[in-house]
Amino acid sequence: MVDMSKYSEVYGSWKNDPDAFWAAAARDIDWFKLWDRVFDPYADEYGRWYVGAECNTCYNCLDRHVENGRGGQAAIIYDSPITDQKQTISYAELLDDVATFAAVLQENGVGKGDRVVIYMPMVPEAVVAMLACARIGAIHSVVFGGFAASELASRIDDAKPKMIVAASCGIEPGRIVSYKPLIDEAIEIASFKPDCCIIGQRPQEIATLIEGRDLDWSVLVNDARERNAKAPCTPVLATDPLYILYTSGTTGQPKGVVRDNGGHMVALKWSMQNIYGMDPGDVFWAASDVGWVVGHSYIVYGPLLHGCTTVVFEGKPVGTPDAGVFWRVISEHGVKALFTAPTAFRAIKKEDPGGELIKSYDLSGFKTLFLAGERADPDTLQWAENNLGVPVIDHWWQTETGWSIAANPVGIEILPVVHGSPTVAMPGYDIQILDDACNEVPRGETGAISVKLPLPPSCLPTLWQDDQRFRESYLEDYPGYYKTADAGYMDENGYIYVMSRTDDIINVAGHRLSTGGMEEVVASHPDVAECAVIGIADKLKGQIPAGFIVLNSGVERDRAKIEGEVVKLVRDKIGPVAAFKTVLTVQRLPKTRSGKILRGTMRSIADGGAYKMPPTIDDPAILDEIKEALKVLQPPA
Ligand code: COA
Ligand code: AMP
């Protein structure tokens, strides 16, 4: 039996009295008005946290630290090996920047409850824009820079933003990603038109601004500074939305995950101390992107709520300039904990298998490595443990939750690390593994990983203006539970093992993507009669998408040409982040007698794993044809 007395005490105290637990945690946040009820089980879809309380997230991230003497401490360290720039911004300076930009937003028509789409790379201005929205009670929706114009357009149509805040470009190794043409195209495609765009011009590419719609960030901010225009914090309800973050759903239409203000602050602040073992003043680095939930929670809100210094890193784990950049950043900025996706470590391990570059840096201040975003493979964990000599902690969560469902709570006690498991349930989460009839399965048996309702603070209360989809996606399959859409098991010590998704979501380099969404795009090619997109195992990215297409009868054009067009179509419609580079033309797709494509079986064949011949298969010979088609992907012996 594993000794987990301290963790058990904390988890038990939550289970005994959840309201008392979350009321105590909420004391670490400054409120303008305290709640009427810690939790109202009758409100909205499954209850709401801190009902009646008033607060402001930006106040808790910035103002209160400055008021309490943290003004001179670094809030942001911007380190951009890709542009060869570094900058340190103190809490006092960041507060000044945010209050000024918040005034600019207000002066340009943005008020409480209005949505603002933010489309920016990893620059401090992205954080300034997010916090400025929070300051005035506007709801931000950050869109990752690797998405194409039509993805941006679908988010614009759903969120209906008053304004878009963007940079002129992002920078990827070897190329500049021009954001402005993507924004112009997205606004063109979208049915909803935002009133204006504020564009931050980067020296690498100056965007052409459209008169009457586009405004220049620097011009507006300089003007506001001259007038000393600054916006105060607008009180919002704890239950008011702070942001909408779109994530892949099972169709091409992304889901707008809503995050509230109060519960989000409480859970993130709690997690910084208890999960990540951070103290105020420590340097925390989440090597992700502000466009993902990891970036929202642990580049921006978590570290700043806790009074830490956060690193905004604009670079890659390899190639900017080499596989030693993570160690350089850790030693140069005194990083105490790094949080990234396993894929980043697989990339580093591939370039520097012996970990030689690690030896050139002083990593004595580095205490813990946290991994999440995809299953952490034991090889990568082992390599990181051997070469870094610090605990390597896998933890499991989702855009929907905003913080860990299962983790190893470093700040409470480090539980024995078991490779392949993100450890145990965090307070707030009653995790149960269910069968299809909604009964708990015995320990060790695989089932649907589910969370008994209610969900804890920070988890999504609903999807943006779509309660119906929220219920259908998460609550209806297992009444009384939240469906994580992950499958796995729990061992006798309560350790969780997250094995696979139960839907069509795949995880490519730590990025969550919908194969259903890709199929919609592939099927739109005029020569494609039908198609299937599956995720196949990849050594570096975990999974990569592969498309199988059946051509319309009578199509005589060169197959390679059509396959190339399909690849381009997905890149143009979804974006480079889909990493969609493999298309195979086949005569037929394997199906059940009722016409369902056997994607799971195709995936098993592609991964070289064992598979059972599905009893309902229409024609077993088609599986051999799929095997044959996949041969082109196999590396030569
Ligand atoms: N803007 C525009 N394009 C972007 C982008 C961005 N912000 N981020 C990625 N892309 C592009 C890449 O340039 C690449 O384009 P290409 O097909 O022209 O080469 C494509 O999207 C796929 O990107 P990615 O899957 O990230 O692959 P990569 O080869 O560029 O890098 C890794 C591989 C492993 C180094 C990289 O995925 C990585 O650093 N991952 C860290 C994981 C992470 O941050 N996860 C987030 C959740 S924690
Ligand atoms: P996202 O919403 O982009 O954070 O992706 C969430 C999904 O990524 C989860 O539902 C899992 O499928 C997967 N995931 C995240 N973290 C882990 C982990 N530590 N282990 C296994 N899968 C993970």
Image (tube, rainbow, N blue to C red):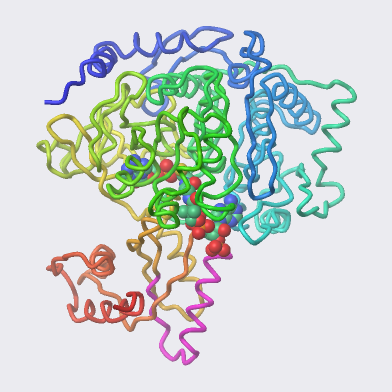
Identify the image quadrant of the N terminus. Answer: top left
Is 352 situated left or right of 609 in this image? right
User: Which residue lies most toward the front here?
Assistant: 360
- State the extent of the magenta-drawn residues as a range: 547-574
Report x, y in % for residue 474.
Answer: 34, 39
Residue lying at 65% horizontally and 45% vertically, measured from the top left: 120
Please give left or right for residue 57 compared with residue 369 in the image: right
- The vertical placement of 15 against 631, above or below, is above
Relative to 469, residue 572 above or below:
below
Q: Is residue 279 left or right of residue 98?
A: left
- The answer to if 601 sits in the magenta stretch is no
Residue 337 occupies quadrant: top left
Q: Relative to 472, is 297 above or below? A: above
* Residue 485 pos. (x, y %): 31, 44
Q: Residue at x 59, y 48 (%)?
A: 315
Give the x, y percent position of residue 131: 64, 28
Residue placed at 58% from the left, 21% from the top? 57
Can residue 609 be seen here? The reply is yes
Asked if residue 473 can be seen in this view, the reply is no
